[in-house]
Image: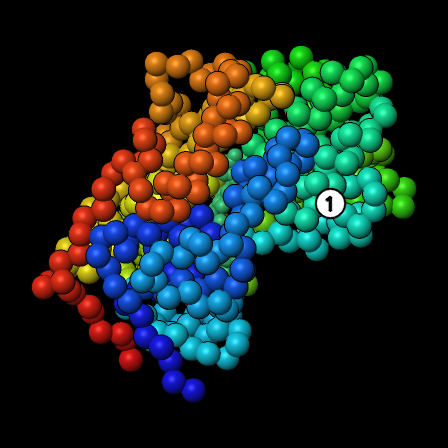
Amino acid sequence: MGSEHYRVLIIGGGTGGIATASLLRRAGVERIAVVEPSKDHFYQPLWTLVGAGVVRPQATRRPESNYIPRGVRWVRDTVAELSPETRRVQLLSGAKLSYDFLVLAPGVRPELDAITGLREALATPHVSTNYSYELAPKTWELIRNFRGGVALFHMPSTPIKCPGAPQKIMYLAADYWRRHRLLAASQVIYGSGTAAIYGIKPYAMVLEQVLARYGIDARFKHELVEIRPEQREAVFERANGDGCERVSITYDMLHVVAPQRPPRFVTDGPLADERGWVSVDQYTLSHPRFAEVFALGDAAGTPNSKTGASAAKQARVVAANLVSRLNGEEPSARYDGYVACPIVTGYGRMVLCEFDYSGNATPTLPWLDTFRERYDMWLLKRYGLPLIYWNFLLRGRAIPFVARETVPSVSHTRLHLAPARP
Ligand code: FAD
């Protein structure tokens, strides 16, 4: 079987993949293809509000075809294998593609077998997760029908997309029960593998007050290892001196988050780092060995939190650096590690956490005190960010305040294409 050749092949048509494709098209790059199996595109950040009964799930889903930029080929297939030496990609259908430049944006998949009993537990009426389009509405059913008892919210210690999401839904649930006079009859427990409520001190201090306001029992360095759905029991491991001990919590409802990893063609392939993420220079986002390969979004091995806001910033860096390479220049755009994590702390309240690789807070709107819980930030999350996502980010347009950097145009007279290695 022959293989179709593309100047730029983008793997994954989610946040990072579509944003990059749009920016490259606007820069004048031709012969781009996006490999994406899903017929739908999801705005995942709203799944938190689906789980809280604020947004209908359908509002987070739109046809993928509406967001493939004009002039870009959509290959509706799944990548099975990569060969960066020959610049070839093997698809699940058996077809093969080849490329001059490769952009990896395949996101992460839940590792449902990493926690014993997790798969079975999710099928019971007491356990849900917002990390799935299908299950987020079930979270809302659990919160709505809860009549008191133990509500357990879990957070793994390993990297996950939007590491704030496991606590956001907990605050929303606690607020709902407070308004319905059920909070006093409830024990809300946060069982987290992490060492603190948040890794960035000024935001952690705000969130500690939120925990206290709802009377949440936060248990850190607790790694969920098993769920016994029959007994409604969650088993955690926690360090105890030199060893570790097991602690069981019996729940009436459980919100759980599976550990996450990139797809197998990445973790088991030649482009992965030792932890299974795509190996990249954290600033240029290009692969250290294969200069024509770039990665962004949740699958990229950058040492920071995985959020859609980061992918939005990274898309501009990848597009600019890829165009530089096409023009025969060295990549000069740099990703500074920007992360934005809108932590919803109740109905009508939100803290906007923003920081970079240095761990310093980098508020986009310095004239607003975004360190405190605000109603206008809630409106941003509920209405503003989805609007920006569908109309600016995915279309490759400048995003007011957040992503204004322009991508240089490709110079068709100077196209620089290094030959594939034999
Ligand atoms: P995705 O957008 O997930 O896209 C990956 C794409 O790759 C998918 O379409 C998939 O089908 C495709 N793919 C997978 N495997 C293959 C393959 N083998 N071949 C071809 N294609 C493949 N971010 C924020 O900034 N703010 C928030 O408030 C926020 N809240 C969140 C709340 C929840 C509950 C969740 C689940 C996520 C949240 N996020 C938030 C995170 C945000 O959605 C992700 O960080 C962002 O979507 C990452 O973009 P990506 O392109 O890397 O991956």
Residue lying at 13% horizontally and 62% vertically, measured from the top left: 412
Residue lying at 52% horizontally and 63% vertically, measured from the top left: 37
Q: Residue 328: image x %, image y %?
A: 14, 60
- Amino acid type at circle 1 is Val
Q: Indicate the quadrant containing the N terminus: top left, top right, bottom left or bottom right.
A: bottom left
| Residue picked out by circle 1 | 225
Left or right: 184 as drawn, with respect to 243:
right
Left or right: 220 as drawn, with respect to 292:
right
Q: Is 69 rendered above or below residue 258?
A: below
Q: Is 307 rendered above or below residue 70?
A: above
Secondary structure under the numbered disc 1 in the rendered image:
strand
Instruction: State yes or no: Cβ of the residue under disc 1 lies below 8 Å from any atom of ligand 1.
Output: no
Q: Identify the coloring.
A: rainbow
Residue lying at 48% horizontally and 21% vertically, measured from the top left: 377
Left or right: 169 as drawn, with respect to 374:
right
Q: Residue 342: image x %, image y %?
A: 50, 28
